[in-house]
Image (tube, rainbow, N blue to C red):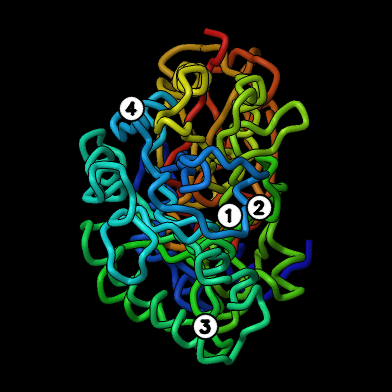
Amino acid sequence: MRHTRRRFLGMAAGAAALGAAGNGAMAETPSDAAPPLPKPSPAQVAWQDCEVGVIYHFDLAIAAKRFAGNNTVRERMDPAKYNPAKLDTDQWLEAARAAGAKYAVFTATHFNGFMQWQSDLYPYGMKQARWRGGKGDVVGEFVKSCRKAGIKPGLYFSTHRNAYWTVWGHYVDWGKGKGTEKQTAFNRVAEKMTEELCSRYGPLVQIWYDAGVKTPTEGGPDVLPIFEKHQPNSVFYHSRQRADHRWIGNEQGFARYPCWATMPGSAGSVSHNHPTWKRLLAKGDPEGTYWSPGMVDVPLRGARRIHNWFWKPGQDHAAYATDKLVKMYYDSVGRNCNLILGEVITSDGLVPASDIERLGEFGKEIRRRFDKPVAETAGAGRAVELKLSKPRRIDHAAVMERIEHGERIRGYEIEGLAAGNKWQKLCAGQSVGRKRIERFDAIEVSAVRLSVTESAATPQIRQLAVYDTAG
């Protein structure tokens, strides 16, 4: 790994600072201020602290029992067919609670363009549905259910595809209408959609534009100022102007390692489609100048040669096995990313019971492994030591940085004080960020030591914890 001036300064400064066990002090040195490291906003910190989310997919096409792979139906439908007889957003949130999710997202619109809230922007939404006599508001009910469950709500909608407006690939006339009067009209509608969703439902953890949203300079709507006005403490995903987190580049449930929360560029030049960004989506850039941590998204029903974000009869067997979901947790949350699981809603408006059961198995196993550490501490400096009250068996360690100060660690080792009072290397790695989970062969130790071998500034350790997952 090459040594930049920033890293050299960090290593030199860190050599003079040693953190004692349990010391949560925010030790700073002159090198911490120059050159500066990219840092997250408070909204980004809150989003990353959620760790696991669930995104719920539902649209007019599913209610109308018009099934196509991942809802790629390119036609207007009779909105009266939207009449899910059993729709219950409280029941939906049972899935998120079961998984241990701390946030949830709903597809306010998807590719069909059907608006699942009360709106007069165009005649294709709740007001035209038979459901609740045209007076329903699924977005409102979803947000209310989230708050009742103690789960942060977020909303997804698509300006990338909208069959009602013949938008496909961000532009009207199935992608051919960039710069036309019809595109201008759709842009104004997209701005109003943003305003309605951002202003009516209180604080949201995030707004998620499917495949991003084009900027005005690209012939798209001017949505960012609207978002910033109404949701100043939320996460924006995403456009060239702002990408508060990034897609990890696959829908298979993993990030690569090492995985950094920083990417190259700055606001106005943070396109997921830029060749540099595309190349770095899965791992980030330790020299990056822009904070955009990874989002690992995967449909729950992605096994057995099925990959479907939306419900289709006969696909209950396609839910990933519990052990596979647990591995995804290690390969996402344990690699400095968030994990968001895609959940389906049936034509009747419910989450399948088998999915809730599977998510419950996943959440239970994660809690069993990580809810109660054998011991934990915090500290600052190039070494943090954790002394156990007595020798204990451990097989996992988790390290967290105080990311509000930036990602500082560039290399580390974890050792255990084993029999014979000898330090034994347990594992080593590069990036930590929000969280790094390490697994190793079970060993009995009386102390654990984190040694930072390379850093960009004085390491700030939010948590060093060890676990016995077989206990």
Q: Position of residue 178 (x, y in %)?
A: 61, 86
The residue that mark 3 highlights is 220
Q: Nearer the viewer, residue 409 or 67?
A: 67
Residue at 30%, 39% (x, y): give it: 151
| Mark 3 secondary-structure assignment | loop
437 relative to 361, above or below: below
Secondary structure of the residue carrying tag 4 is: helix
Alpha carbon distance from label 2 to label 3: 31 Å
Where residue 470 appears, as percent x and y from the top left, is 57, 9
Q: Nearer the viewer, mark 2 or mark 4?
A: 4
The residue identified by callout 2 is 259
Decide: is 102 above or below 158: above
Image location (x, y in percent) of residue 340: 52, 42
Task: For residue 16, say whether it is visible.
Answer: no
Tell me the kind of residue under disc 2: Cys
Counting from the top left corner in percent of width and height, residue 321 is at 64, 20
Separation of marks 2 and 4 at Cα, in angstroms = 35 Å
Task: Give the number of the mark in front: 1 or 3.
Answer: 3
Q: Secondary structure at mark 1?
A: strand
Label 1, label 3: how far apart the Cα atoms are: 25 Å
Q: Which residue is mark 1?
A: 294
Q: Can residue 366 be spotted in the picture? A: yes
In this view of the protein, which residue sits in the foreground, 36 or 243? 243
Residue at screen point 25% across, 38% down: 145
Hey, what amino acid is under mark 4? Answer: Gln
Q: Are the residues tagged 1 and 2 within 8 Å (C-beta)?
A: yes
**Please, what is the three-letter code of the amino acid marked with disc 1?**
Gly
Q: Are marks 1 and 4 in contact (CB under 8 Å)?
A: no
**Nearest to the observer: residue 258 or residue 249:** 249
